[in-house]
Amino acid sequence: MHKKFITYKQSLEILKNLDIKPTKTEELFISDSLNRVLSEDIIAFENSPAFETSAMDGYAIKFDDLKLDKIKIIDKNPAGSIVTSEVTSGTCIKTFTGSLMPKGSDTLIPIENVTVEGDFIIINEKVKNGFSVREVGENYKKDEVLIKKGTIIDFAQIGVMASLNISQVKVYVKPTVAIASTGSEILDLGEEQTNDAQIRSSNHITLQAIAAKYGANVNQKGVVKDDRQSILNLLKDALKTSDIIVTTGGVSVGDYDFVKDIIKDELGCKVLFQGVTIKPGQHLIFAKKDNKFIVGLPGFAYSSTVTFMLYILPLIFKLKGSNEALNIKDAIITHDFPKKTIKTVFTACNLNYKDGNYYVDTNGKKVGTSAILTNMLGDIALLIQNDDSKNLKSGDKVKVLIP
């Protein structure tokens, strides 16, 4: 193995120790904040409910009056109004869902538990003390942190903010990822093939979809030919507007693999690592220019897809201020599977969930080069075999990365 190569574990340590904190925020209407990352704690400024409230339709009574044969109805208490009458011994007030509990009452007996005779109720089925009364602060209490900074906003967070009368919320600005495929042999979507040596690039489109799925803006740069000036111009331009610049191709050891040299020489980036003992995708370069990142990934479709998930997604998570991490789970492999190399290997496999466990197998997956992106179709996971892993036996517990 190349002496400069580091292990996957070492590369993760470098990623983990990067001091990245999002600084830019924007204010959005809560209805526009779905899937964005909260940049401040949401704190309750009042109790909810602020007063004892009825949880259903019924009659507000004193609990001790359940022993009486009849209880006199003295008033009605619709939701949204405040009744001035007070419940005293032997009396009750008809009270509706969401109404404040009248003064003097401590229990609500449901409508279906009583029979009404004139101005009285007859209790057919008793309830416990305090039944169907929402306590002060049942939903949340004043000064309680309801939603923490770094939370990805979903429908529940939007609902809670609406209940607090919060119409606008501060979120982190999405990081921008510039993506380009390099190679004189590759064609962009819609380009006409002029010779048999040309191939259709899917990398930049695939990586755009992954970046967008996980909450980044994408600056799509398309396909760039294999010459130093074109690649240099691409990287310089992308650095002006993007937080992360990702290229595919041009990082191996061929005569036309210019990306790694341009990153180091013309741009003067700080290379954090170059080459990792992983399969697929050992030839990659991870560099930093000021507070921006330039990452050169391999050109094969499966390699670039896997390495993008391994190395770019953690950057996106950090830059957008979320508490996310790669979705790594325990699973059980259902057949023997060999360890073929001392590298850390990521193998596309079928994923099933049954009786509380994930199960994986490689049935129907094609064996070949790191160009086979079709292995990512279906319900899949990446089986992780560490550099020191042994051959797997059917029934072994394994780690998988679920996209």
Image (cartoon, rainbow, N blue to C red):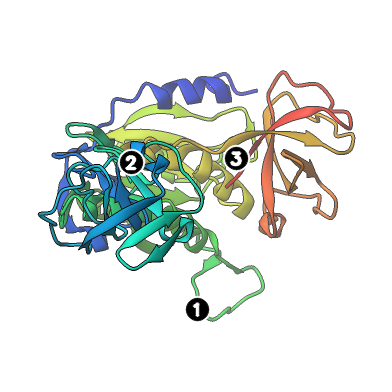
Q: Is residue 255 in view from this perspective?
A: yes
Residue 275 appears at what percent x and percent y? 53, 30
Label whose residue precedes the other's in the sequence (1 or 2): 2
Q: In whole angstroms, how far apart are the C-alphas of marks 3 and 2?
A: 32 Å
Q: Would you say residue 149 is visible in this rendering?
A: no
The part of the image, by quadrant, that contains residue 134 is top left
Residue under pointer 3: 281
Q: Residue at point 39% right, 26% down?
A: 272
Determine whether the residue tagged by mark 1 lies in a helix, strand or loop: loop
Tell me which amino acid carries mark 3: Gly
Rounded to the nearest whole Å, what is the CA distance between mark 1 and mark 3? Answer: 27 Å
Q: Which mark is residue 151?
A: 2
- Among numbered discs 1 and 3, the one appearing first in the sequence: 1
Q: Position of residue 81 (x, y in %)?
A: 14, 61
Number of marks in the rendered image: 3
Dot 1 amino acid type: Glu
The reply to whether the C-beta atoms of the residues labelled 1 and 3 are less than 8 Å apart is no
Amino acid type, mark 2: Thr
Camera-nearest label, 1 or 3: 3
Q: Position of residue 4 (x, y in %)?
A: 52, 21
